[in-house]
Image (cartoon, grey):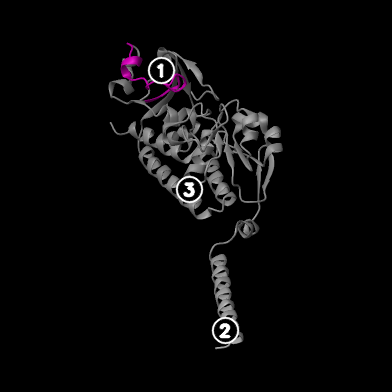
Amino acid sequence: MTCHQTHRRWASALLIAVTAALCACNEKSAQTPSPQSSAAAYTPVTVQHQLGTTRIGHAPQRVVALDMNEVDFLDQLGVPVAAMPKDFVPHFLARYKDAVSVEDVGSIVQPNLERVHGARPDLILITSLQANHFKELSEMAPTLHFDVDYRDSQARYIDVIREHLLTLGDVFARQALARQKVSELDTRVEEVRRITAGRSEKALVVLHNNGAFSSFGVQSRYGFIFNALGVKPAGPNAETGLHGQPVSSEFILQANPDIIYVVDRTAVMERRPVMDARNMDNLLLRQTNAWKNGRVIFVDAQAWYVTGASPTSLKLIIDDVEKGYQR
């Protein structure tokens, strides 16, 4: 074989190998879109909310959630959290507390804006608790406000939670999962409403704070317990807003509820176990129907107080509501 023939055969073999490699690369590229092609395929989402209009132009990669409800929404949709406040993390989100990949941006009520900026967010999620920082946050990244009303939850409370789930499903292109989570939530709401619809018991929701109690009626942060879940209220339907109406044991006895739901704020704020009947016991309360029949329910305080407007917390609240009808 001549040197010229050997060179021609070597060149042919090399051409075949290069062609095969290029075909393999093209096939792999077709199966796994590059980041650029994924970004190009993203459909921008525009959301109108109480603080304005927010446009998300590309798939968010670093999401900062400044409210525990928002952390739970992201958790439900399988979206990574880049940063969050870590001052009051509920037990059902405990894995985020010590996660080194999740940066701590201070407190829920007063987030550290320098830390938020340092987290390099491309989307920020807030509620009314951080609404006064909306302008500054919007200068860092698109900022989306969750329009839940913590002062008066009687109107469209669960509808707003559903809508937010679906909105985030659009933002993160996880529409099917969002619809599944909404369906699960609707199922639990329907289940508890079937229980409460046929019952005559009346209930009182009270919040414990360092030995004092506040009552929450139909027009309050826990109004959805009565309006959306079908629990019948005991006592006057006074406006009680975010912090409730201070009440005495005499008031509770006069209302004489069949069920008392106790939210122990002190347990949350001081990070200690939720109070029980021994801590609350007194002569007047023992005379109520609720006490006599063992229907004083010490609820999941973190779900009711720290969150209360997310898929997981709402399911835990429904679990507690049902306990009042099981005895």
Give x and y (percent) for residue 269: 47, 20
Q: Is residue 37 left or right of residue 315?
A: right
- Where is 105 relative to 275, above or below? below
Circles 2, 3 touching at the beta carbon (< 8 Å): no
Pick whichever, 137 or 188, lies toward us.
137
Which residue is denoted by mark 1 in the rendering? Answer: 252
Q: Considering the numbered disc 3 on the image, is that residue within a helix, a strand or a loop?
A: helix
Query: Upstream in the sequence, badge 1 or badge 2?
Result: 2
Pick whichever, 101 or 259, lies toward us.
101
Query: Upstream in the sequence, badge 3 or badge 1?
Result: 3
- Where is 251 relative to 237, above or below? above
Q: Quadrant of residue 85?
A: top right
In percent of the image, x 61 and y 47: which residue is there? 60
Q: Considering the numbered disc 1 on the image, is that residue within a helix, a strand or a loop?
A: helix
Q: Is residue 53 left or right of residue 252?
A: right
In this view, the residue farthest toward the bottom is 1
Q: Please identify the quadrant where the N terminus is shown.
A: bottom right
Q: Which label is found at residue 198?
A: none
Which residue is denoted by mark 3 in the rendering? Answer: 182
Label 2 Cα neighbours within 10 Å, binned few <14 / some 14-19 / many ≥20: few
Task: Say what amino acid the circle numbered 3 marks.
Answer: Val
Q: Determine the CA span between mark 2 and mark 3.
A: 69 Å
Which residue is denoted by mark 2 in the rendering? Answer: 6
Identify the magenta region.
260-283
In percent of the image, x 47 and y 30: which residue is there? 89
Give x and y (percent) for residue 163: 55, 46
Give x and y (percent) for residue 302: 44, 29
